[in-house]
Image (tube, rainbow, N blue to C red):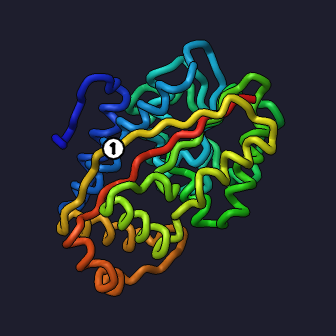
C-alpha cells in the first residue's frame, strides 16, 4: 500500500484526514497507521450499502477517531452524530480532523455509552457502527453487546436502517492467518465476538426485518516484522486499561506467526430495517 494513497473514490475530506494521521505517525509505526487509515476502503464499502442520498440523521456508534464519520459526512448530505465513550485527546483529534476536512458543520460529537445512549426513541434514520462491536464486547462481553443492539433498535425511526460491520465474528476468519489473528484478539484482548447468529437473533427478537449480510476482504497480510509492530502497538495502548505483556504474548504466538503470518479477517456487515 502506498502512503498518502488517494485512489478512486477517496474524497478530499478523507484524504485530508488520512494525511493528518500519516504525518503524525511515530517512526516505526507507519505500517499500523497505513493499515488503519487505508482500511477506509472497507468504510466506503459500508457507506455504499446504505441509501443516504436524502438528508438523513445518522448515528455513528463507537465513532473512535472519526474515520467513518468523515466518510459519512463527505460522501452524503446527512447530519452525523458521532458517539464514543472516550473523550479527551481522541475526541479533540476527531474534531480537529473534521474541521481540517471541512465537514464539521454537519457533525455533532457526543461523549456517551452505546449501551445507554442519551437520545430519545426514534431519533435517527440510520444507525451504523464499524469495528465498534468488538470494543463493546471487550468492555462488557455479551451483555454489553445485547444492550447496544437493543439501544440501536430503539433509536431507529420506522423504516430506518441499521448496519453493524465488524471483523471479529468467528465466521470472519477463513484462512489460517486470519484464524490466528482472531485467536489472539479473542484470547488476549477479549475482542472476539460470538457467532454472527447471536446478533441476527437479537435483531429478529426486536422485530427488525430485511436482514442482509455482506462480506469485505481487506486483503491485509502481516509478515513477522509488521505483526510485531502491530501487536506491540496494541499492548502499548492498553485498550480499556487491559495490561498486556508483549514479551509473553510473542512467546505464546511468535512461532505460529512466523509460520503462517497474520491476516485481517473479513469484515462482515449485517443490515436490518425497522
Q: Position of residue 215 (x, y in %)?
A: 45, 39
Q: Position of residue 106 (x, y in %)?
A: 56, 25
**Quadrant in which the C terminus is drawn:** top right
Nearer the observer, 79 or 207: 207
Q: Position of residue 50 (x, y in %)?
A: 55, 25
Residue sitting at 48 percent across and 33 percent down?
46
Residue sitting at 19 percent across and 68 percent down?
224
Residue sitting at 39 percent across and 53 percent down?
265
Residue 108 visible in rendering: no
Q: Is residue 200 left or right of residue 45?
A: right
Nearer the observer, 177 or 105: 177
Q: Quadrant of residue 237?
A: bottom left
Residue 237 visible in rendering: yes
Nearer the observer, 58 or 21: 58
Q: Is residue 49 left or right of residue 200?
A: left
Read off the residue under disc 1. 218
Q: Is residue 21 left or right of residue 241?
A: left
Local crowd size for mark 1, using a 10 Å CA cut-off: few (<14), some (14–19), many (≥20): some
Q: Is residue 143 above or below residue 215?
A: below
Nearer the observer, 92 or 220: 220
Q: Position of residue 199 (x, y in %)?
A: 66, 49
Q: Quadrant of residue 184?
A: bottom left
SS assignment at label 1: loop
Q: Is residue 65 above or below residue 18?
A: below
**Quadrant in which the N terminus is drawn:** top left
Q: Is residue 258 above or below residue 218?
A: below
Amino acid at each position: 500500500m502506498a502512503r498518502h494513497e488517494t485512489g478512486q473514490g477517496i474524497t478530499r475530506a478523507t484524504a485530508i484526514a488520512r494525511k493528518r494521521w500519516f504525518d503524525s505517525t511515530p517512526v516505526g509505526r507507519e505500517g499500523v497507521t497505513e493499515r488503519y487509515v487505508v482500511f477506509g476502503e472497507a468504510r466506503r464499502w459500508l457507506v455504499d450499502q446504505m441509501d443516504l442520498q436524502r438528508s438523513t440523521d445518522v448515528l455513528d456508534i463507537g465513532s473512535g477517531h472519526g474515520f467513518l464519520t468523515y466518510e459519512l459526512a463527505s460522501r452524503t448530505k446527512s447530519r452525523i452524530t458521532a458517539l464514543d465513550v472516550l473523550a479527551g485527546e481522541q475526541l479533540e483529534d476527531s474534531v480537529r480532523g473534521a474541521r481540517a476536512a471541512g465537514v464539521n458543520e454537519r457533525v455533532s460529537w457526543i461523549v456517551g455509552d452505546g449501551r445507554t445512549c442519551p437520545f430519545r426513541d426514534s431519533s435517527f434514520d440510520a444507525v451504523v457502527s464499524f469495528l465498534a462491536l468488538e470494543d463493546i464486547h471487550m468492555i462488557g462481553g455479551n451483555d454489553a453487546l445485547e444492550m447496544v443492539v437493543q439501544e440501536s433498535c430503539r433509536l431507529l425511526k420506522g423504516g430506518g436502517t441499521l448496519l453493524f460491520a465488524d471483523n471479529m465474528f468467528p465466521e470472519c476468519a477463513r484462512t489460517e492467518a486470519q484464524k490466528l489473528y482472531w485467536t489472539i484478539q479473542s484470547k488476549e484482548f477479549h475482542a472476539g465476538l460470538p457467532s454472527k447468529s447471536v446478533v441476527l437473533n437479537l435483531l429478529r427478537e426486536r422485530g427488525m426485518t430485511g436482514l442482509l449480510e455482506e462480506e469485505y476482504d481487506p486483503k491485509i497480510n502481516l509478515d513477522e516484522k509488521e505483526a510485531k509492530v502491530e501487536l506491540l502497538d496494541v499492548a502499548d495502548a492498553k485498550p480499556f486499561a487491559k495490561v498486556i505483556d508483549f514479551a509473553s504474548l510473542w512467546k505464546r504466538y511468535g512461532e505460529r506467526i512466523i509460520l503462517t503470518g497474520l491476516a485481517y479477517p473479513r469484515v462482515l456487515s449485517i443490515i436490518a430495517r425497522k
